[in-house]
Image (tube, rainbow, N blue to C red):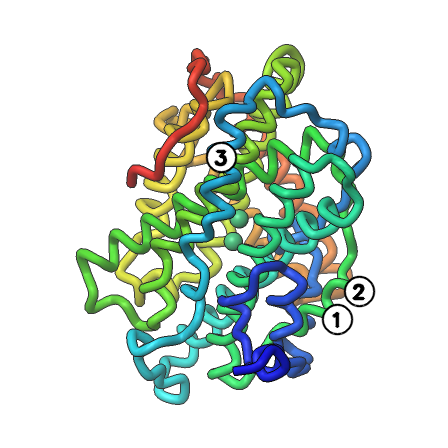
Amino acid sequence: MNAHAELKAPLHSADASTAEEALARQEVIDSESATKVALQNTLLTPRFYTTDFDEMDAIDVSPVRADWDKLIAQMKADPNKGHFKKNEDWDHVDWDGMEPRLKREFIDFLISSCTAEFSGCVLYKEMKRRGKNEDITTLFQLMARDEARHAGFINDALREAGIAVNLGFLTQAKKYTYFRPKFIYYATYLSEKIGYARYITIFRHLEAHPEHRFHPIFKWFKEWCNDEFSHGEAFALLLKTDPKLTSGVNKLWIKFFLTAVYATMSVRDHQRPAFHEALGVDPVWYGYEVFKKTSEISKQVFPLTLDIDHPRWQPGLDRLEVANRQIADGRKQGGVGGWLKRQAGSVRAGAAFLSLLTIPSVPNEVPVETRLQPAY
Ligand SMILES: [Fe+2]
Ligand SMILES: [Fe+2]
C-alpha cells in the first residue's frame, strides 16, 4: 500500500492516536433530540468546564517525577489502541423489541455518558492546546485521546438506535462552567475514580450474572475503566505536587466535592429504575459499592473520606432524591403551583445536602507512595 492509499484508508476513532483524529472520524449525523439532551445544563447533567489554563500550565511535576514518567510511559504505550470499536463480541441489539421504559432510560444513560466522556475530552484538549509545559501538554493530549475514543464508541452504540450526539456542535453550543484549577483537580480526580468504580462494579456484577447483560457495550467496561483509572492516577500525582492542595481550608473543599459528587450520582441513578432493574442491580447497593471503592482509592491523596456508614448518610441521600423528584414535578406542572413546588423542593434539597455535608468525615493519613493499580 502506498502512502497515499494509507492516508485514505478508513480509520475508526478507536485506532486514532490523538483526540483530533478520533473526532474527525465521527460521522456528523445530527440527531437533534439527542444533542438537545446533551446540551441541557442542570445540577444533574454533565457539564463542560473551562479554567485558568495558564495556572495549570505552570505546574511543576518534579516532586513526583519518577511516578509521573512511569505513568506517562504506560499511557503512551497505549494498551487500548483499537479496543473501542465493535467486533465479533458485539451482539445484535434488538432496539425495537426493547421495553420502552428501559429503552428510554438506557438511551438517556448513553447520552449522559457520552456527554461526560466528551466533557473530559474538550477540557483536556483545550489544556493541551493552550499549554507550553511539555509534561502537562503530553498528559492532557493522552487523556483527550482516550476520552474521544470513549465518546466515539458510545456514539457507535447510539447510532444503532438511530441517534447520535453531534459532538462538534456540542463544543460550540454548550455552556462552559468556569472552575479554578484546584476545583478542576478535585472534581476531575473524583469523576475519573468514581467512573472507574462505576464501570468495574457493573462489569464484575455482569460477569457473575451474564443473563442481565442486555447490551454488548458492558463487555467493554473493563478496559474502559482502566483508562479512567490511569486518568485518576494522573490527577492524584498533580494533587501531590503541592501539599497546600490537600491541607488547611482545602480539606473543606475536598469534603464538599466528595459529598456533591456522591450525592449527584445517587440522585441521577435513582432516575433510571428500569435500567437498574434490567441490570439486576439495586441502586442503593450499587451506590454503596461505588462509594466504598472510590473512598478506598481516594485515600491515596485525600486527607479524609466520607462516613458512608453514618446513620444520617443514606436517609440524607433518600431525602435528596425525594426533593429532586418534587423539583422535577414542579417543572413539569408549570404555572404558579409548579413554581411553588419547585421552590419547596429546592429548600428540601438544600437542607438534605447540608445534613450530608455536616456528617463528620473520617480522617486519613495520606501514604507517601501515591500510585495504585486497579484492584477491583
Ligand atoms: Fe473516559
Ligand atoms: Fe477519563
Placement of 232 over or under 8, stated as above or below: above
Residue at the bottom extreme of this rendering: 96
Q: Which secondary structure lies at badge 2?
A: helix
Answer left or right for 310 relative to 181.
Answer: left
Mark 2 lies on residue: 172
Res 233 label: 3
Q: In x, y percent, where is residue 217?
A: 38, 68
Choose between 336 and 278: the one closer to the eye: 278
Q: Which secondary structure lies at badge 3?
A: helix
The CB of the residue at mark 3 lies under 8 Å from ligand 2: no
Label 2 to label 1: alpha-carbon separation? 5 Å
The kind of residue tagged 1 is Phe
Q: Residues within 10 Å of mark 3 (few under 14, many from 20)?
A: many
Placement of 227 over or under 170, stated as above or below: above
Which residue lies at the image location 53% right of the left edge and 63% below the top edge? 149
Choose between 66 and 178: the one closer to the eye: 66
Pointer 2 with pointer 1, Cβ within 8 A:
yes
Q: In x, y percent, where is residue 79?
A: 41, 53
Which residue lies at the image location 49% right of the left edge and 69% below the top edge? 153
**Which of disc 2 and disc 3 is earlier in sequence?**
2
